[in-house]
Image: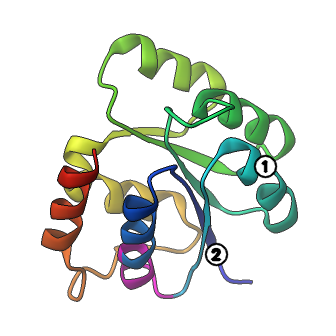
Amino acid sequence: MRASILIVEDHDTLRKALRQWLEVAFPCCYVLEAASGEEALPLVRARAPHVVIMDIGLPGMSGIEATRRIKSSLPATHVVILTMYEDEASRAAAARAGASAYVVKRTMEIDLLPVVATLLPGQKEPETKNCHRKSLIRITRADS
């Protein structure tokens, strides 16, 4: 069974750029997308992704609440919070909800791939040779 990653991000441009980046970095994984916590929960139940990359500031249900629900129903699924919030209260809330890691969008081009690689089964290092980090950086700065 192929490993899978679910991206939960409400900004379409960033979500699509993340998907392309992750598909290149982890070619053996399925990469799924959701624009909200409400959209993510049925996908999680149906597909049981190994890793969920979750924004905190989502419309409707927050990423913290979605993380709590995912971990309650599928404790083996790893949730990586990917957010612009750098405060300790947000980090603590994510940890209480069961997040496996917390990555700030400002540093994601450096921090995200190694974190995801450690959480995927059998994954050692992400494939970075063909990853176009500069285009992702441009998109995230314009979309933040």
Left or right: 20 with respect to 4?
left
> Is residue 93 shown above or below 41?
above
Closer to the chain start, of discs 2 and 1, is 2
In percent of width and height, residue 96 lies at 61, 19
Q: Which mark is residue 3?
A: 2
What secondary structure is marked by label 2?
loop
How far is the residue under mark 2 from the one under mark 1? Answer: 18 Å
Q: Nearer the viewer, residue 12 or 42?
A: 12
Left or right: 113 with respect to 57?
left
Q: Nearer the viewer, residue 128 or 8?
A: 8
Q: For the N terminus, which image quadrant?
A: bottom right
In percent of width and height, residue 36 lies at 64, 47
Q: Is residue 76 visible?
A: no
In percent of the image, x 43 and y 11: which residue is there? 89
Left or right: 48 with respect to 106?
right
Q: State the residue position of label 1.
A: 41
Q: Is residue 26 magenta?
A: yes
Q: Nearer the viewer, residue 95 or 12?
A: 12
Place residue 68 in its image quadrant.
top right
Extent of the magenta region: 21-27
Q: For the C terminus, which image quadrant?
A: top left
